[in-house]
């Protein structure tokens, strides 16, 4: 019998992996999708939760107001064996559950999930491909809805020292698949990086970054000769963010060296330097937070904020 070896973050935006894992383990599962918002909502259309028959769950649909009620409703739907649509907030039958500012949301509980289709979504995401899942139309007045999934964001950190370690640690907490490249064994082998993929790097051969449009790459070297060796390959990718640590003076020298190497100005202008939204910070923790904040802002600038499309809904990405 299948036995899961995974641990799950409860408040995760990606719930399909958990749902698929529980189905493989022989458990019944409800996939709950936010399909309508009246007023304001802390979560966008397409936000999801997955709940197993045992009460395990992943995901979130509010700021903490309704998750326990959703779990109870999901278990009831699983036992009933029928999909259902439930309203919470203004106009709901659940008078004891109120949302801020008199808002209302409607959720669709799908307990008839096609395991094979879910497996394809998980496979696509693991291959860093965009995927989608159709929410059953015969149970919805609006007809079928399509939930689109982008791969998780990826963070590639190349560097040496405590700031690189701290950024690599923050990446997974912000839902980035994270890889650390470092020529320094003490950086790669920092005990706190046990759960992070850490790989050696050669000054004379840039790694194959495997960067796509959902990838951020950050260079964190104090020996800035590494920048000229490694940054050109990063600029050949379509990563949404390429940043490099250092002062304004250091960045000016970096730009000069890359120009001498024949890198075009349009490419060089992609580099965020000095990386980070705060200037003058010295703590490794603060540097890492500053850079991660800039990465998240760059991602928000380049993407939309929802993922549900249907007739009557705008086709948008999340």
Image (cartoon, grey):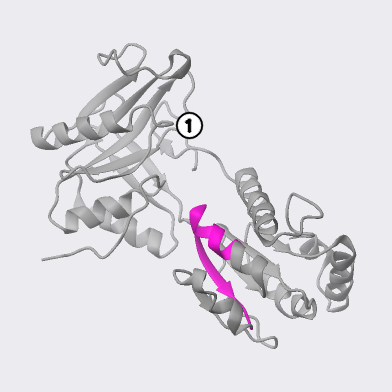
Q: Nearer the viewer, residue 55 or 191?
A: 191
Quadrant containing the N terminus in the rendered view? bottom left
User: To which quarter of the image does residue 230 belong?
Assistant: bottom right
SS of the residue at dot 1?
loop
Bin the neighbour count of mark 1 within 10 Å (Cα to Cα): few under 14, some 14-19, many 20 and up: few
Where does the image place residue 209, in percent across and percent down from the top left? 58, 73
Q: Residue 148, can we see it?
A: yes
Establish if 30 lies above or below 175. Answer: above
Query: Residue sitting at 36 percent across and 48 percent down?
Result: 132
Left or right, 152 with respect to 277, comes to left
Q: Residue 138, can we see it?
A: no
Where does the image place residue 14, in percent across and percent down from the top left? 39, 49
Where does the image place residue 99, in percent across and percent down from the top left? 40, 19
Q: Nearer the viewer, residue 249 or 192?
A: 192
User: To which quarter of the image does residue 8 belong?
Assistant: bottom left
Q: Nearer the viewer, residue 196 or 44?
A: 196
User: Residue 235: within the magenta?
Assistant: no
User: Residue 168: within the magenta?
Assistant: yes
Report the residue marked by disc 1: 314
Left or right, 241 with respect to 250, comes to left
- Magenta residues (range): 167-183
Establish if 236 lies above or below 239. Answer: below
Query: Residue sitting at 24 percent across and 37 percent down?
Result: 136
Left or right, 209 with respect to 133, comes to right
Exactly how many numbered labels are in the figure? Answer: 1
Query: Residue sitting at 65 percent across and 49 percent down?
Result: 293
Where does the image place residue 228, in percent across and percent down from the top left? 78, 77
């Amino acid at each position: 019998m299948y036995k899961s070896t995974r641990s799950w973050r409860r408040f995760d935006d990606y719930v399909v992996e958990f749902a698929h894992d529980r189905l493989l383990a022989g458990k019944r599962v409800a996939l709950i999708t936010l399909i309508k918002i009246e007023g304001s909502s802390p979560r966008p259309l397409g936000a999801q939760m997955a709940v197993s028959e045992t009460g395990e769950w992943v995901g979130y649909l509010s700021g903490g107001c309704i998750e326990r009620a959703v779990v109870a409703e999901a278990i009831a739907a699983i036992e009933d064996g029928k999909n259902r649509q439930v309203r919470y907030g203004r106009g709901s039958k659940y008078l004891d559950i109120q949302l801020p500012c008199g808002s209302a949301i409607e959720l669709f509980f799908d307990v008839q999930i096609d395991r094979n289709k879910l497996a394809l979504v998980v496979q696509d995401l693991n291959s860093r491909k965009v995927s989608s899942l159709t929410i059953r139309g015969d149970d919805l007045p609006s007809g079928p809805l399509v939930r689109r999934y982008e791969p998780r964001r990826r963070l590639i950190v190349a560097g040496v020292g405590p700031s690189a370690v701290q950024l690599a640690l923050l990446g997974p907490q912000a839902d980035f698949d994270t890889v650390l490249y470092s020529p320094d064994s003490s950086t790669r082998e920092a005990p706190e990086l046990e759960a992070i993929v850490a790989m050696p790097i050669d000054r004379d051969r840039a790694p194959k970054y495997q960067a796509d449009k959902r990838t951020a790459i950050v260079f964190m070297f104090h020996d800035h000769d590494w920048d000229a060796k490694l940054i050109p390959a990063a600029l050949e990718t379509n990563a949404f963010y390429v940043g490099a640590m250092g002062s304004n003076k250091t960045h000016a020298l970096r730009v000069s060296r890359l120009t001498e190497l024949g890198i075009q100005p349009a490419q060089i202008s992609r580099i965020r330097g000095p990386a980070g939204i705060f200037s003058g910070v010295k703590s490794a923790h603060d540097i890492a937070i500053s850079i991660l904040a800039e990465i998240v802002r760059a991602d928000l600038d380049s993407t939309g904020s929802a993922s549900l499309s249907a007739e009557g809904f705008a086709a948008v990405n999340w």
